[in-house]
Image (cartoon, helix red, strand yellow):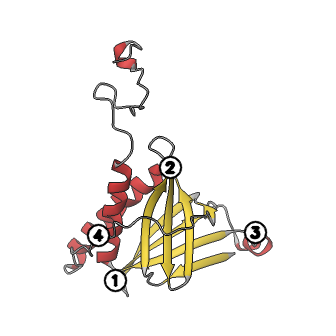
Amino acid sequence: MSVIEFDPPERFVVGTVGPPGQRTFFIQASDGSRRTQVSVEKMHVGVLAERIETLLDEVGGHEGGVSAAVEAADNAPLDTPISEDFRVQALSLAWDVERRVVVIEAHDHDPDEVDEALAATSPDVSTLKVILSPSQARAFARRCETVVAAGRPSCPFCGGPLDPEGHICPRANGYKR
């Protein structure tokens, strides 16, 4: 089993490749000359951002001192060349109480279904582990929200995505508007 760890990364960002409606989402972690890029679903990115914000709000309330500050926004595009190291099947999020950091893991497998015997016999099982300060985690969550929101606009009637060539809205009995 391969665990690729960044503790902490110099850069940890999410971005997309392709036009809205056909985008592929990537998470990149890098430090020095080492870079790992994994592809994720849009839903994963949105949920991860939401959970990071919730986690930091809860920890800040319980521990009374987790900084609500956000690092300067990293709005630069993804580093190139972009190639998928693996496709994410599951994400996990944790708070390390002793170090007061956020731990994000991206797995190319379902961690509940992989036991030590399978990991030993299947060396292709990979996990990306990234450790972030609370301010880095908040900055990452904000970028996730921005990237998800940059997709196709929503139909005001049904909430479905609007395509550039038109939209057949079920709330309008299939008529194009």
- Residue 100 marker: 1
Is residue 90 positioned above or below 12 on the image?
above
Which comes before the other along the chain, label 4 or label 3?
Answer: 4
Give the amino acid at mark 2: Gly
Q: Nearer the viewer, residue 31 or 91?
A: 31
Q: Could you tell me if the residues under marks 4 and 3 are in contact, i.e. CB atoms within 8 Å?
A: no
In the image, taking residue 56 as reference, residue 94 lies left or right, namely right
Q: Residue at x 40, y 19 (%)?
A: 170
For the residues labelled 1 and 2, say whether their Cβ atoms are less than 8 Å apart. no
The answer to which of 50 and 95 lies nearer the viewer is 50
* Image location (x, y in percent) of residue 43: 45, 49
Q: Residue at x 37, y 87 (%)?
A: 99
Q: Is residue 1 left or right of residue 80?
A: right
Give the alpha-carbon distance from disc 1 to disc 3, as whole Å. Answer: 32 Å
Q: Amino acid at mark 3?
A: Leu
Distance from label 3 to label 2 (Cα)? 36 Å
The answer to whether mark 3 and mark 2 are in CB contact below 8 A is no
Asked whether, in this view, residue 163 is left or right of residue 89, the answer is: left
* Amino acid type, mark 1: Arg
Q: Quadrant of the C terminus?
A: top left
Write down the quadrant of residue 2 in the picture. bottom right
* Residue at (43, 73) in percent of width and height: 12
Secondary element type, mark 3: helix
Task: Give the residue at mark 3.
Answer: 118
Q: Quadrant of the N terminus?
A: bottom right
Q: Residue at x 61, y 77 (%)?
A: 3
The residue mark sitting in front, 3 or 2, is: 2
Label 1 close to label 3 by CB (< 8 Å): no
